[in-house]
Each structure stands twice: as C-alpha cells, then as structure tokens.
Amino acid sequence: MTSLASTIAPRDPNVVMRLARLGSFHQSRLSFMRQLLRRMAREDWRFETRAFEIDSAGVGHAVYTAHGPERAYSLIAFAHDLPPEKRSDRVIATEWDATFTLFDGIPTKADIDRLRDNVPRQEAGRISDRELSLSRANRSVRLWNHVIDALSEGHQPDQALVDTVGYLMRTTAVYGSGKFGAADREYTRHRPECAGPFQIEMLSVYLTRAFVMDLVEHMARARAPRTAVPLDPALRRRFGIGNSTGLGMAPFLINHPRLLNAWIAAREEALARVRSLPMAGTAEVHAFRTLVQRARIHAQSWTSEHPLQVEKLAALRADMDALGTYLDDADLHSGQPWNRLWVWAEAHLSMEGQEQLASLMLEPHGEIVDALSICMAAEEHTAWPIDGTMPISDLRAILEDVYDWALRIDWTDPTPCARVWYVSEAKLEPRLGERFQEPVEAYEQPLGPGRDAARLHSALRDTTEQTTAAFLLQRPEFRHIARRAQMAARLPYAEIRDNTLDARMLPIDMLRLKLSFFGACQFDPRSDRWLRINMYQHAPFPHELDSVTADDWTLPPLCMAAE
C-alpha cells in the first residue's frame, strides 16, 4: 500500500456544499454502480436467464437471476407492446414499454403470475415484501427501431447514432425501500451486498440493461431469423440505460442529512488522501494521464441543448484542454504532486473541471479510496435526540457557523422565499410551487433549512431561557431546526449551504449531485427541474464480468478518439 503523509485536510464544507459546486459533481470510484460491479466481480457472482418467454411482438416476461455468495436476486421483466400515443416519461403515465421488479430469491410460477397482475400497473398495483424494487422503462424509439432494422438486415447499427443517444430504454422510476408494498430497507440492510446505499436499485438497473439488449436482439431475430445478427460485443457495451429524473429526487438530500454527510465525507476524505500522497508511482501517473485523455473524449461526446448545460460543457471542454496542456510538462512523481495539481486547478479550472479532476485523481488509487465505501451508509432510522442541556449561547454559535450564509439573507425580500416545496395529492410526488403566485403555502414541506435557521436565530435573540430544552418548551415549532443544527455541527457535510427556496435556485443541481453518487453520466437537463442521464454505459455485461475489467468502464475507451 502506498504510504500516506496526512497533511491535507478535507475541503471546507462552505466550499463544497454550495449548490453550484454540488451540481458539478461527476461519478467516481465511490459511486454506487461501481461499488456493485466491483463486489460482483470480486465475489464471482453467477448469472443466468431463467426465463425468456417473449413473442415476436416483444410481449411477455423474462427472469434474470444473479447468484451471490449467499443469496440470489431475480429481475422479473414484463415487456409490453405500447402504442406510441401512450408513451410518456411523466410521472402521470399509466403504461410503459417494460416494467420490472427485483425479486428476493428465485420466483415460482405463482410468484410470476401474481406479479404479472401488479407490476405492469406500477403505482396502481401492489407488490409484497418478497419484492425489493419496482421500476419501468420506455424505449428510445428512434434508436430502438434503427437497431432492430439494422440487425435484422444482417449489419450493425450506425455507431454515431448509438453514441448520440446512448441507450435503447430509459427508466422513468426505480422505486425501492418499502414503496407500494416492497420490502423495506430494514429487511435487507444487514446483508453485506445490500449494506451500501442503493445497491438493490443499482442491481435492478444493471440487470435491466442486460434484458433490454437481449430483447432488441430477440426482436431482430423474430423479424428476420435467417439474416439477423447479434450486436458486436464492443458496440453492445456502448449502450447504457437511460433515466428521466425529476423533482421527486431533490428533497431526498434535504431529508437525509446524515446520509448526505456520509456520501460527501467519504468523497472528500478520498480526495484529501490522494492530495496528501508525497509521491506517485509510474503506473499511477500513466493511468492518470490516460484517464485525462479519456475524460476529454467524454467531454466532447457529452451533448445537451439546455443553455445552462451547454455553458457548463463548454467550460468542461476548455478545462480538459487546459489540463492536458498543463500535464505536458508537469512533474507528477514527487513533491506531493496531486496536491500541486489540485492547487493549480483551483486557480485555473471552472467548478465543472475541478470536480471532474477530483474524480480522475481518485482513479489510480483504489487501494486508499475503495475502502471508504463502507462509510457511505447511514441508518437514519436511529434517533438523533435533541441535546436539551445545550446552552442557548452554544446553539446560537452553531447557527452562526453552519448557517452564516442564511443569516445574511434578507428574508423579507420575496425572492429568497419565492418557492414552496409541497407534495402533490394525485401522485404523492414532491412539487415546487411559486409562493406568491399559487395557493400552495398551506401545504409547504419543511425543506428550507436556511430560512428556518434564520428564524430560530432571530427568536434566540429575544429569549431569556438559558438552555435549549427550556427554549423549545416555549417554542416547539423550532424543534426540527434545533435538532438539525445540532446534527450539522457534528456532521460537516450534512447541510446544503444554499437557499433551497430561492427563486433562482436550480433543482437540477440537487438531482445531479445524487445521480453522480449513483454513477450516472451524460447529464442532460431538459429544464431546471428534470434531466436525463445514462447509467452503465460502457460497463461489462453480466457474462463479461470475469473477462472484462469490472472497474474501468466509466469513461469512453481511447479508441473512440479516432472515431
């Protein structure tokens, strides 16, 4: 193991926890997809297709089973022939091209019959505690039809079109943790393979990708059994699974401060460890330089039409060019080289480029980074009691430290409090309303910690009580923010240090933050409130995990540069 000189501290949360920076995060070695694939390769998981009963129209069901060291998990997929007019990525949709559940174990025929009556209905159906997730997906119609046409005619699809779209289906929801009758996380969290965040959901998506690729090849063979060919393996890996994600994901980060702290703290500790290395070996330097070239390819191939993302992509491409030029003459072997590189980046790269560099710097150092993945779970079902003995002066000091940014805001101005988070009655999904234009304030959710902290700070100026308990007995409406402040005092990355109610706030920053920890790429905002991503693009398929490197797939291969 490389020796450490622990001289570099993790970054200040006042720098890291601003929405503009959080909305510039990229996937890394600690992302949840990569944790899953490393585990499955290390533990030699076995995969089988137990059923594939799908007709020539693409209707039927399939069962894909992953066998771990102690347990098996089965993706049960239902494929449908959906009329184009019914295809929608919106949460109000009621039909989809495919629907899925991840089953705990191996399903019987009775299980499949039961689930056939419920899984295609999604929210309108009900599943049991034998099921761990519920999801659905729609085809990317243009690419789907093109791939079937090409394969059935005996040739490969157009590579440029494949790279432009990047996926044949995109999920519009992957539900877990007790929704619609599925098993709660409490049921699985003690299992090693489920202990990390979102491992069940990541497994569901991984098996979904395998099913989608098998399905498109099956439909090409069904159309022209004599001429159809399978996808070339290298081209096949260029397909990921798309995802459309909206506002429903954003409040999760505010509602789970302990978990957010665990994710960010692990990443920041990893970066600090790498920056503290006194030197770098030849292999690590070569790997890093290669990764920078691949990141430049990624930046060039990443497209979006949203003005905000177009601007960020222009900055990222310029940053990758500047980084490449800097590396031409840089000494990366001695004198704390990674820290010198980071200091240069802070002065010369945009936040987008800095956070891409942070991910790249972790890549060659799995031996000091990967073990941090065990720190990324946080069981928030355990209570975090309010310390009622805390003197009011100490509580006030916490507010002035953690929420100083909020105390500087003029909360009488309409702009900082223009937004209202509420839950829709129809779909029980988070929504964002306009406080002064819509009658939604009565339904407001407590998702503006900055405003609440400022109100608490103001109330503390007028109290004569000496302890937190005595004050809260008189003012119980402040219990939630007092508890949150005490938590944030001990968990430095638990709180987003920006105003989540501001008219200028971009919810897509929160979406990207969470999705980067999933391991998503190709963030493509469609507004300030929803975006599309790609998951598992370039990843080995289940049958390839023992022959293709399971942890070197998140950036395009160098061969794409020539293309």
Image (spheres, rainbow, N blue to C red):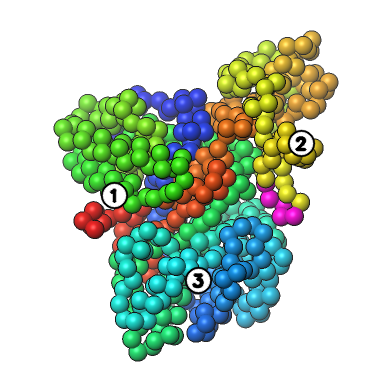
- The first of marks 3 and 1 along the sequence is 3
The amino acid sitting under disc 1 is Ile
| Side of 421 relative to 558 (left or right) | right
The N terminus - image quarter: top left
Q: Is residue 41 visible?
A: no
Give the magenta range: 426-430
Q: Quadrant of residue 232?
A: bottom left
User: Would you name the residue on which mark 2 appears?
Assistant: 441
Q: Are marks 2 and 3 in contact (CB under 8 Å)?
A: no
Q: Position of residue 461 (x, y in %)?
A: 73, 11
The amino acid sitting under disc 2 is Glu
Q: CA distance from mark 1 to mark 2?
A: 46 Å
Res 297 label: 1
Res 109 label: none
Q: Quadrant of residue 355?
A: top left
Q: CA distance from mark 3 to mark 1?
A: 35 Å
- The first of marks 1 and 2 along the sequence is 1
Look at 57% across and 40% down and name the residue there. Answer: 507
Judge depth for marks 3 and 1 and give the one in front. 1
Look at 44% across and 38% down and name the residue there. Answer: 24
Res 65 label: 3
Look at 58% across and 74% down and name the residue there. Answer: 82
Looking at the rendered structure, the secondary structure element under dot 2 is helix
Please, is residue 348 above or below residue 248 in the view? above
Q: Position of residue 54 (x, y in %)?
A: 52, 82
- Magenta span includes 427: yes
